[in-house]
Image: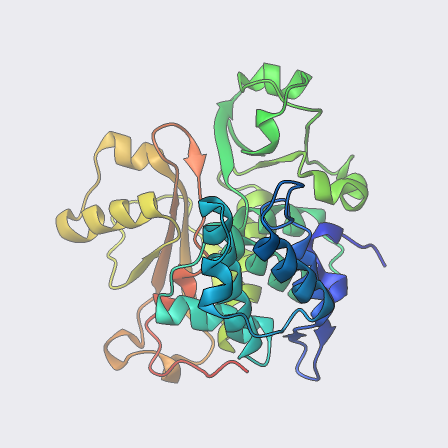
Amino acid sequence: MNDFWLASGHHLLDRNTDGRLALTDEFLKAYLARPELAPPPDACAAEKILYAALLDDSRRPVSADEIAAITDADARENWRHMITFRDHLNIHATVEAAYVALVREGKRVPPLFLDQLVQVILRNLLDGAENAYLLRAAEMLFRPQRLTIYDGSLIAADLEYIGAAAASPLVAMLGLPHAGEIDLLNDDNAASYWQRSDRFDMALDLSAGRCGLAALGAVIELWVKHLLAVEIAIEPVVELGDVAMSWYVGLDAEATRIGDALWQHGALDADERAGIVAFYRLTFADPNIVLPRLADEPVYLILATTADGVLRVKPQNLLTGLPIRELATIA
């Protein structure tokens, strides 16, 4: 079986009988290896003592006084965030439950922590996947993308990766900033995805009617089923036309703004239409779980890019924005 996203820390977690991820000391200790937390040689004694204690016992209680004793202000802030996040993970039975609670309770945590949880949850629910398009589309839920039109196609490339220094023929061809070697995912190179998955160096065609958008829709179906225990079906809407929206969910900040405009005015201007990357129709397998007034109505999902071509998907919106009567308790 092909492995992928090794750096997510998936292998450091256990899986319970429901197929969800159980927290381990090894996973928590991996956070201590991050450069933001590993004390530099000139760190104060308080920080070094705290760090050594957590290496010995990653779940050890940490008092506010211990963090306040750290001399460097940036280090104190990093440790406050880390310990708050660690304590939140500790009180939940699974990583999935911790993530859902963060989203539903609106707790403020560094976006990096949310993205890391999304990645490791996706790694779990996509375990054994054999479709490279599905896995590449899933990257969009935890890594920002740069979108570019080339030869009539809408191409998504990893925003962080294309900021690298080396040159790439595809990047030059697309008019993107120079980056490391990057390929457009296609049937000929799809088999190489697993070996290079941690590099995030494959671009995805998101043009209407092509498999990139269908793959993203399939990822969303799996995400909602795994985290909300709700069966849905998603299909791309190729022509927006005069869609009457009874309910919609914006999958990013720009999409929410566009959805609001469409809701209020029933139409979009040219710039707003141009910003739409994807428009999906979502239906529920069991209409009885939907709010009564929407039982026979589809829900629409909108994905959009900013004016400078950046796409930042917010998968948490799917956990809070769907018109479900009663949200399941995720353990």
Measured from the top left, where is residue 60 in percent x and y? 62, 74
Quarter occupied by the N terminus: bottom right
Q: Quadrant of the C terminus?
A: bottom right
Which residue is painted at 35% across and 77% down in the image? 324
The residue under the point 44% across, 44% down is 312
Which is nearer the eye, 311 or 279? 311
**Residue 174 horizontal/vertical position (percent):** 56, 19
For this rendering, which residue is in front, 96 or 140? Answer: 96
Where 25 falls versus 123 (above or below)? Answer: below
- Up the image or down, 73 lies above or below 19; here it is above
* Residue 85 seen by the camera: yes
x, y percent for residue 328:
45, 82
Look at the image and tell me whether residue 126 can be seen: no
Q: From what the image shows, is residue 269 above or below residue 215?
A: above
Q: Quadrant of residue 193 in the image?
A: top right
Q: Residue at x 68, y 24 (%)?
A: 180
| Furthest residue in direction left, as rendered | 265
Going by the picture, which residue comes out furthest to the right? 1
Q: Is 4 positioned to the left or the right of 158 in the image? A: right
In the figure, is residue 11 to the left or right of 155? right
Indicate the colouring scheme. rainbow
